[in-house]
Every structure is written in C-alpha cells, then in structure tokens.
Amino acid sequence: MKRREFIMLLGGSAAWPLPAHAQQAGDIVRIGVLNTGLDDAVSGGLGYRAFVAELQKLGFAGRNLVIDYGRTDQGADKAFADAAAMVRSNVAVIVASGSELPLQAAVAASSSIPVVILANNFDPIARGYVASLARPGGNITGLFYRQPELAQKRVELLSEAFPTRMRLAVLWDASSSETVAAAEQTAKALNLQVHSAKLDRPPYDFEAAFQSMAGANPQMLLVASSRFFALHGARIAELSIKHRLPAMFNFSAYTRTGGLMSYGVDPVPLWRRAASFVVKILRGAKPADLPVEQATTFELALNLKTAKALGVELPTSMLLRADEVIE
C-alpha cells in the first residue's frame, strides 16, 4: 500500500517502523483504517490523531501496533484495493470512516473481519449493514450520525441568520444525495428558492461550479458533506467570499479555514470512541454484541472575520449560542 502508517506505541513515543525482532516475537497488533488523507484537517488530521492517542490511553502504549492506512478520497478503485491489501496483511479490525464507500470496500474485502464504522451521509441500518442500534448482529459496529437531519438544521440556521434572503444554492456531489434531498425539503418549507450545483467526476473544478451558480444569483450557500470537499475547505470558503455568498459548512474545521458558519458533530470525540470499539474487539468482544452509537453533541461555529469580509452581521442571538466564535 502506498499510504501506510507504521506506528510503534511505546509509552507515547514517536512513530517509527517496527523492528524485525518485534515482528518475529509475534506481539504486533495490526489494524486497518479507511479514511480520507492525513492532510484532511477534519478526519485525517484532528480525528485520526485523537484516535491514535486514545489507543495509547487505552493500554496500547506498551505494545506494538501497526496501522495500515487506506485512502477513500482518491476514488473507489483505490479504496477497494487498499481494503483488499489490509485483508492480505491479516488486520484484526478495519475502521471505515466517512461515506458508504469505505464500508463497501471493507465488506467486499472480507465478510468476517470486524469493522468499526464512523459513518456519515448514509444510514447503516436502513442500508442493511447492521440489524439495529442495540444489536448489530454481524461483524460491523461503531458510530454514525444522521447527516440528513443535520443538513435540515443547517438550512434553518442560514435562514435564521439571513431572514430576508430567499435564494439558496447547494454545492454537493453523489455521496451527499440523501442529505441534499433533506436540505431541499426544509428549504422549500421555508419558502426558499433552491439552486442545485452538483459536482461530478473528481477532482472538482470549484471555480467553474461557483461561476455556474452565479447565473442563478443565489444569496446563501449550503456546502454539503463530501469526502472530496474535505481537502478544499479553504478554497471553497475563498470562493464563497469572492462571490459574496454567506456559506454554511458541516464541520468547524471549515469555519477555521474561512467559512462563515458550520454546524455539525465534533469529529474528535467520535474518533476517540472508535478507538474504544477497536480495543474492545482486540480484547475479545464481538461486534455483534457492541451496540452502534449515534452522535448526540453538535457544535455551531461562526467566523466574524469572514462576516466582515462579506459585509454581513450575524444575529446576536446566534453569537450567544455559538460554541466557537472566530474573530
């Protein structure tokens, strides 16, 4: 695999390749992670680092751990190939983070290796991966959060912040189709006109997408969740300011790189919980017996510097409710 992290967790020491004598001793724990790139500030950055730190905290500081890291933001072929390579490497657990693609890749590679999900943009129960939250019933467990409901809340927050603006553009791709459908439903209930700006065939041309949106003269922008957007948050935020569009994102990391607003989960606690699932399985628990958990804590982040650049003011009531205000 081209993107593999060899991590030696010995008392919190730095990451180094495992020595040959440790491999021969047979005391190596090997897991796989299917996720966006490590340069993704949301999941591959803060989230993944929290995951590794939690593994240390939960007792893996005194033994060797190898993490095979597979990319999911470079197309389906890459994700499926990386998952298959993990199975050939005899990983004990696979962590599948993000949209349905990494889980599809993990399931295609093996029907028996335990999988811990960090799922968004799809419902693992509705799509038949797990039987129920309380009793998953197979080799898959973990965490998920309902992006369609969060997308509806984001539309409501945009409308609350800008009550006189009635034209909403939505930037999305195929992986976020369910969330966009929910967002459009809420927008119509609020009497908003929706302009759909779907992107196809990554890598995406965001400049062209914004130029196309300009023809509809939108007044606000909802940026849907997509693994292909994660590395381009600053660029999307820059274009939204250039086109005078107050934009709503799904993670606070986007707001820190220039987005006006975000509402969604904090990925760091979710990755820590994912580590606890992995450790339980490594210590003998069966995925079928580990209830699937849903995120229950969400955060609103606002960027006042971006608001100034856009020439807009955010309601005081929203500023008081915000979990993070960037000035």
Image (spheres, rainbow, N blue to C red):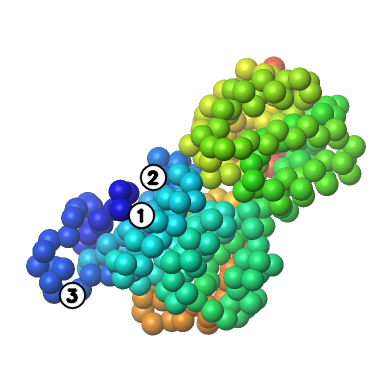
Residue 324: % across, % down: 58, 39
Disc 3 residue type? Gly
The x and y percentages for residue 18 are 17, 60
Question: Tag 2: residue type?
Answer: Leu
Q: Residues within 10 Å of mark 1 (few under 14, many from 20)?
A: many
Say which mark, if any, is on residue 57. none
Circle 2 residue: 38
Q: Quadrant of residue 92?
A: bottom left
Q: Position of residue 65 (x, y in %)?
A: 27, 64
Q: Quadrant of residue 282?
A: bottom left
Q: Are marks 2 and 1 in contact (CB under 8 Å)?
A: yes
Residue at image mark 1 = 69
From mark 3 to mark 2, how far is it between C-alphas?
Answer: 28 Å
Say above or below: 106 vs 4.
below
Rendered image: mark on residue 26: 3
In front here: 327 or 236? 236
Residue at 40% over, 56% down: 81
Residue at (43, 81) in percent of width and height = 285
Q: Is residue 1 above or below residue 166?
A: below
Q: Is residue 296 visible?
A: no
- What distance separates the C-alpha of mark 2 from that of mark 1? 9 Å
Q: Residues within 10 Å of mark 3 (few under 14, many from 20)?
A: few
Q: CA distance from mark 3 to mark 1?
A: 21 Å
Q: Report the amino acid beneath label 1.
A: Tyr
Residue at x 67%, y 31% (from the top left corner): 247
- Residue 190 x/y as whole percent: 88, 40
Q: Residue at x 83, y 41 (%)?
A: 187
